[in-house]
Amino acid sequence: MKEIKLYKSPLRAIKLILLSSIFVGFGLWGILTGHMPTWLARLNIVFFGLGYPVGLFHLLDRRPQIIINETGIFDRTTNIDFINWEIIQDAYLFDIHKQKFICLVVDEKFIPSQNKSKLYQQTTKFKEVIGAQELNISLGQVKIDPEKLTEFILLMRTAAKSSKADLLDKTSSA
């Protein structure tokens, strides 16, 4: 079966590590020179120091973030198995503070929170309040054109089963 696999961008992980280094260095400078309260400098080092393990994890993690095939679409951040093309009713691009998401509109009976607790169901209503859906594909760590991916998802959603393999071939070779 033909698949398109999208991986995390190593450049974004390197940017995170470099930006963390700047602020950790600023905290070290504050401790060494005394121009900053010690508690603030240490807080700065600890908080921005967390960027190192996160950045290294993203840099070394070579598992695909998003997999698209004839069956559906899989995103590791959703903690759900493949989302079949048949249950996707619509898809649209959503932006929250320059972070891109593809929101997938699915049939009511396939919404993941219906099998969860009442508290979980109430917290997922917040997504709808801000204009997102319950199933959202995060594109923050993936280097891809969000508009083209949204168009491709809409194409795959409406394509006949026989033409989905051709669409995957055309897209993966382009």
Image: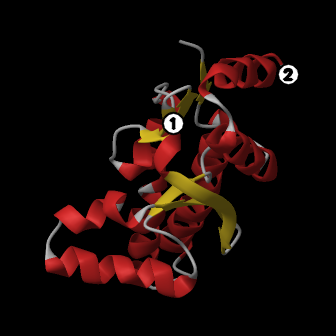
At a point 43% along the width and 61% down the height, the residue shown is 107
Label placed on residue 174:
2
Find residue 163 and report its horizontal and vertical position in percent: 70, 23
In the image shown, does 144 or 71 lie closer to the viewer?
71
Check disc 1 and give the amino acid type: Gln
Instruction: Tell me the kind of residue under disc 2.
Output: Ala
In the displayed orientation, state which residue is furthest to the top: 1
CA neighbours of label 1 inside 10 A, class few (<14), some (14 to 19), many (20+):
many
In space, the residues marked 1 and 2 are separated at their CA atoms by: 20 Å
Question: At numbered mark 1, what does the secondary structure look like: helix, strand or loop?
Answer: loop
Horizontal and vertical percent position of residue 14:
64, 41
In the image, is 80 to the left or to the right of 142? Answer: left
On the question of residue 143 being in view, the answer is no
Image coordinates of residue 148 in percent, x first then y, are: 80, 45
Toward the viewer: 36 or 130?
Answer: 130
Residue topped by disc 1: 65
